[in-house]
Amino acid sequence: MSENYTKWVACWGTATSITERKEAVYAKNLTLQYPLRICFSGSALRLHLSNLTGTESVEITKTRIIKDGEAVPVRFGGSEKAQIQAGAEIESDDTALFLRAGEEITVSLYLSSCTQMNAGTLLSGPLSKGVYAYGDFAETPSASIPAASKRNTSWFYFLNTVDILTEEKNHALICYGDSITAQSWPDYLALRCAENGFGDVSIIRRAVCGTRILREYDCLTYAAYGLKGEKRFSREIRAAGASAVIIQHGINDIIHPVGVETNIFRPWSDLPSVDELINGVKTLYLKAARERGLSVWSGTLLPIHGWRTYAPFREELREGFNEWLRSSPLFDGCIDFDKAVRDENDKTKFKDGFDSGDHLHPSEEAYKAMANCVPEILF
């Protein structure tokens, strides 16, 4: 049967960015465990680890894939230890492991020495759960780690992408964006595919909270808001077997600037025009995606009425940008997330039950609606 497994396809993925800059940014004698649902059957895995935003080299002492209670070693250039230089990303050796679609594995990382925890991203959703524990639990299934010794985490450190050697028909769909995409809708999209028999596609989430198309922050206060589109996009669409990308990005460009009198890091000069947002997507996103042979789908920006920096001029920017995202022939299609979640009588607001409470991020029901409006042609 393994003779049919000839193509590497990304089956899980996130982005790597700067983690939140707290006073304590180092860890020692730490185990990180990330349970992942495998969407394709296959005969081998390879892991991509990233220290892209680190300023020091890091060493992963042990990497294991835990399946059915058994811990399988992952090696890097034949070595059990993974050395990742600052600003670098590495790929593991192929790890032979027979997997069936729908199975769950856990990627387990053990850091024995003092390690800078500066490369990772914050994720949430029904399929995005992590655990950490102090001590060497690299080969211990999470359920067997004493409750007093472990704690849940939504931060995904170092683990960037998992590829599987699978069938030629399988492919990856990339979801690119900011905190809206770092939250639940890609997980609900993956579940929708699994539940409705779309078994040929994986959902690869490339999302970082707070990021913008045209700007980034060079300060500790907003360091975790990550890299701008120019530095992110061309790297993040490099997913094995990818066929298409959905881009839902740009709301932070519109809502962040407030003037230096209010916040020295958020000058009015950062506020883009609609034309500048459009040009950013054309030059930074569409060009890179087409060069990789990807189909490109736009995703409209969601309502923001009631958000703390809401103003009519920001609404005009959002609506103008959305109109281009809906109508431009440069895209292969548009996914109208805005229409799926907005109030029918007031398009500036979420519909009842679809607002998380901050008037910017959707509720879980709204994230399900976003996942449900993605057209089946992409699967």
Image (tube, helix red, strand yellow):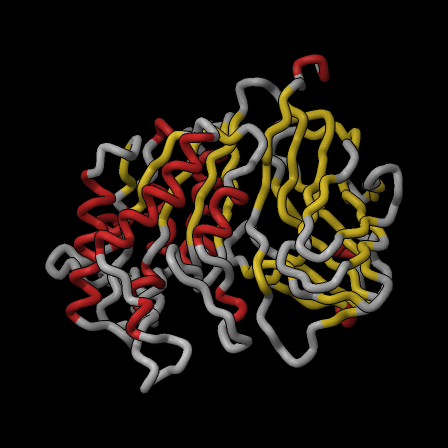
Screen quadrant of the C terminus = top left
Q: Position of residue 232 (x, y in %)?
A: 50, 50
Please say if 22 is above or below 113.
below
Q: Position of residue 281 (x, y in %)?
A: 33, 46
At 30% from the left and 70% from the top, the residue drawn is 269
Q: Is residue 29 left or right of residue 183?
A: right
At 66% from the left and 14% from the top, the residue drawn is 4
Q: Position of residue 325 (x, y in %)?
A: 24, 44
Of all residues, the one furthest to the left in this rendering is 345
Q: Nearer the viewer, residue 22 or 86?
A: 86
Q: Please count the marks in the image.
A: 0
Of all residues, the one furthest to the right in this rendering is 79
Please say if 353 is above or below 126.
below
Please say if 344 is above or below 101.
below
Q: Nearer the viewer, residue 29 or 365?
A: 29
Please say if 33 is above or below 245.
below
At 36% from the left and 43% from the top, the residue drawn is 283
Q: Nearer the viewer, residue 27 or 281?
A: 281
Screen quadrant of the N terminus = top right
Is residue 200 visible in the rendered image? The answer is: yes
Q: Is residue 69 left or right of residue 288?
A: right
Q: Is residue 325 left or right of residue 162?
A: left
Q: Is residue 233 left or right of residue 160?
A: left
At 50% from the left and 59% from the top, the residue drawn is 227
